[in-house]
Amino acid sequence: MSETTSASASERAYASIRDRILEGELLPGTMLGEAQLAAEIGVSRTPVRAALARLQDEGWIVIYPQRGALVQGLGERALVELADARLVLESTGAGRLGEDARERLADRLDGSIEAQRAAFADRDVRRFIELTIAFHRSFVEASGNSVLLELNDRLADRQRFVLFASGERLLARCEDIIAEHEDLTRRLRTGDVTGFTATLRLHVSDAYELPVPEHPLETLARDRAR
């Protein structure tokens, strides 16, 4: 097998296993074996071994020599940290936009919201999740800071895992999620950074079913109001 072919097989194995973990097909606590994975994916054990090593580096599995690889989930601390990081990244991105940039982004987000409604009407969970992740990414992307965007993109798979794990709860909340996205877009358009941040914190908190610490902007606004 050539080096290019081997790399391609490893990438295919990695993508297959990762997607099955993120989409909830391989649940936390599942023990994975190289031979079975290789047969299911249609590759040899070598690219599967490379894929598992990569997934362990990313925190999705733990490899136990001679036994297999154990699928990991996200604990409560990891969820709180993820939510907190998202709040900082997205509110920072939105807060750096001038009026014209806010208007352009808000117009684009209106289109995203319509696509989200269509995905919900079709009960297309995968499409709705990808649109939701792209919606929130837009706030960071619009800031023009490539480092912030890189940090945000490194969290995308964790966001997918959380949303797919929500299952029926996600579908039950779709209308509320879309309404919250509309509220975020309105606040962005008017330049209400503090209101945007507070709405985003509650939005993320509801999604993860965990309390999210106040952003310093919210604390400052409350102290000034006293």
Image: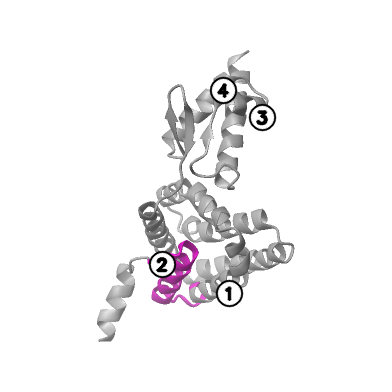
Q: Position of residue 86 (x, y in %)?
A: 42, 58
Q: Residue at x 51, y 72 (%)?
A: 184
The CA span between labels 3 and 4 is: 13 Å
Mark with earlier residue (4, 1): 4
Task: Identify the residue under disc 2.
Answer: 95
The CA span between labels 4 and 2 is: 44 Å
Q: Residue at x 70, y 58 (%)?
A: 124
Whether residue 150 is situated above or below residue 189 in the rendered picture: above
The residue stretch that appears in magenta: 188-211
Mark with earlier residue (1, 2): 2
Q: Amino acid at mark 3?
A: Glu
Q: Could you say which disc has been placed on residue 179 in the image?
A: 1
Q: Position of residue 55 (x, y in %)?
A: 48, 34
Task: Identify the residue under disc 3.
Answer: 40
Which is closer to the viewer, label 4 or label 1? 4
Local SS, label 3: helix
- Circle 4 crowding by C-alpha within 10 Å: few under 14, some 14–19, many from 20: many
Q: Residue at x 72, y 65 (%)?
A: 118
Task: Identify the residue under disc 4.
Answer: 47
Asked whether 177 falls inside the magenta stretch, the response is no
Local SS, label 1: helix
Q: Position of residue 182 (x, y in %)?
A: 57, 73
Mark with earlier residue (4, 2): 4
